[in-house]
C-alpha cells in the first residue's frame, strides 16, 4: 500500500509541475503578443496632439508638437542602471496654437550641471503618457529644493500651469537640448515566463527523480 501511495504522489507531483510549466508557456505567448501590440502602438506615425487627450484612449499615442519651452522645470529624482542617480527634467511647452503642455525632456545625472532650457522654437516628438508612480511609500515632493519623487500628471500640470498632458520626448530638433531622452518602451514590463516555465520543468524532473528513488528504496526494503 505504501509503495503504490508513493507512486501516486510521484505521478501527481510531476503532473502538477508540468502543468504549471505549460501554463507559463501559454502566459509567455500571451505576454509576447501584448508587448508586440504595445511596441506597434508606440512606434506608429506621430500625430498632432488631440484636444483634451485622455489616458484610457490616448495613452502611449505617438505625437509631435511645434513650439517653445517656457517657465519652470521640474526635477524628478530617478536612477538609471548605467548612469546612476539623476533627474528627469519636465518643462512646460507652449505650442504654436497657444496650448501649454509638459515635455519630459529626459535624464541628467546628479553630478552634471543642469543644462540650459532651449530658448528657440522647435519640434518635439514622443509619446503621451500618464505614469503611475505614486504609492503609500512615495515621499512628499520637496518643492523648495525642486526635487520630486514621482511623476503625477495632474499635480505637475497644476505646478507648471499647463494642460494635464505629458509628452515623453523621443527626439527633437533643439540644438541646445543636452538631456538624454528616456522614451517610452516595453523594457520596464516584466516578461519572465520562460524562466518560470523552465524552473517548473526542472522541478518536475527533480520530483520525478526523487519519487523514483523513494519508490526504488521502498521496493528494495520490502523485498
Image: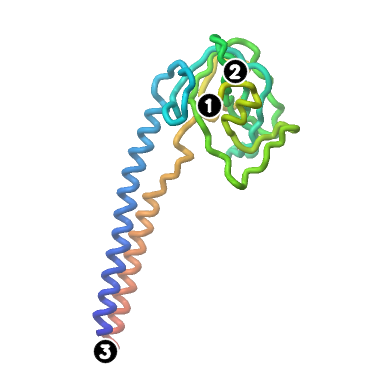
Label 1 neighbour load within 10 Å: few <14, some 14-19, many 20+ = many
> Which comes sooner in the sequence, label 2 or label 1?
2
Which residue is identified by label 1?
168
> Which comes sooner in the sequence, label 3 or label 2?
2
For the residue labelled by badge 1, is the local secondary structure a helix, a strand or a loop?
A: strand
Which residue is identified by label 3?
222
> From the viewer's perspective, is 14 left or right of 175?
left
Frontmost of labels 3 and 1 is: 1
Return the mark for residue 28: none
Give x and y (percent) for residue 91: 62, 23
Give x and y (percent) for residue 132: 53, 38
Residue 176 sits in quarter = top right
> From the viewer's perspective, is 30 left or right of 94?
left
Give x and y (percent) for residue 11: 26, 70
Frontmost of labels 2 and 1 is: 2
In percent of the image, x 27 and y 79: which residue is there?
Answer: 5
Return the mark for residue 93: 2
Q: Quadrant of the N terminus?
A: bottom left
Amino acid at each position: 500500500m505504501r509503495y503504490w501511495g508513493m507512486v501516486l504522489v510521484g505521478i501527481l507531483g510531476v503532473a502538477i509541475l508540468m502543468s504549471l510549466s505549460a501554463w507559463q508557456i501559454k502566459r509567455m505567448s500571451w505576454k509576447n503578443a501584448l508587448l508586440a501590440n504595445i511596441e506597434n502602438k508606440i512606434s506608429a506615425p506621430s500625430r498632432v496632439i488631440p484636444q483634451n487627450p485622455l489616458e484610457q484612449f490616448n495613452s502611449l499615442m505617438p505625437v509631435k508638437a511645434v513650439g517653445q519651452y517656457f517657465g519652470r522645470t521640474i526635477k524628478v529624482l530617478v536612477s538609471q542602471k548605467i548612469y546612476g542617480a539623476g533627474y528627469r527634467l519636465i518643462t512646460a511647452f507652449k505650442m504654436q496654437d497657444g496650448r501649454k503642455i509638459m515635455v519630459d525632456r529626459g535624464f541628467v545625472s546628479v553630478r552634471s550641471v543642469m543644462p540650459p532650457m532651449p530658448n528657440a522654437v522647435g519640434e518635439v516628438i514622443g509619446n503621451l503618457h500618464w505614469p503611475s508612480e505614486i504609492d503609500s511609500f512615495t515621499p512628499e515632493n520637496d518643492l523648495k529644493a525642486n526635487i520630486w519623487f514621482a511623476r503625477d500628471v495632474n499635480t505637475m500640470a497644476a505646478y507648471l500651469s499647463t494642460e494635464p498632458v505629458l509628452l515623453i520626448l523621443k527626439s527633437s530638433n533643439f540644438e541646445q537640448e543636452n538631456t538624454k531622452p528616456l522614451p517610452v518602451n516595453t523594457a520596464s514590463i516584466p516578461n519572465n515566463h520562460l524562466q518560470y516555465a523552465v524552473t517548473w520543468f526542472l522541478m518536475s524532473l527533480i520530483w520525478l527523480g526523487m519519487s523514483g528513488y523513494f519508490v526504488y528504496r521502498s521496493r528494495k526494503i520490502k523485498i
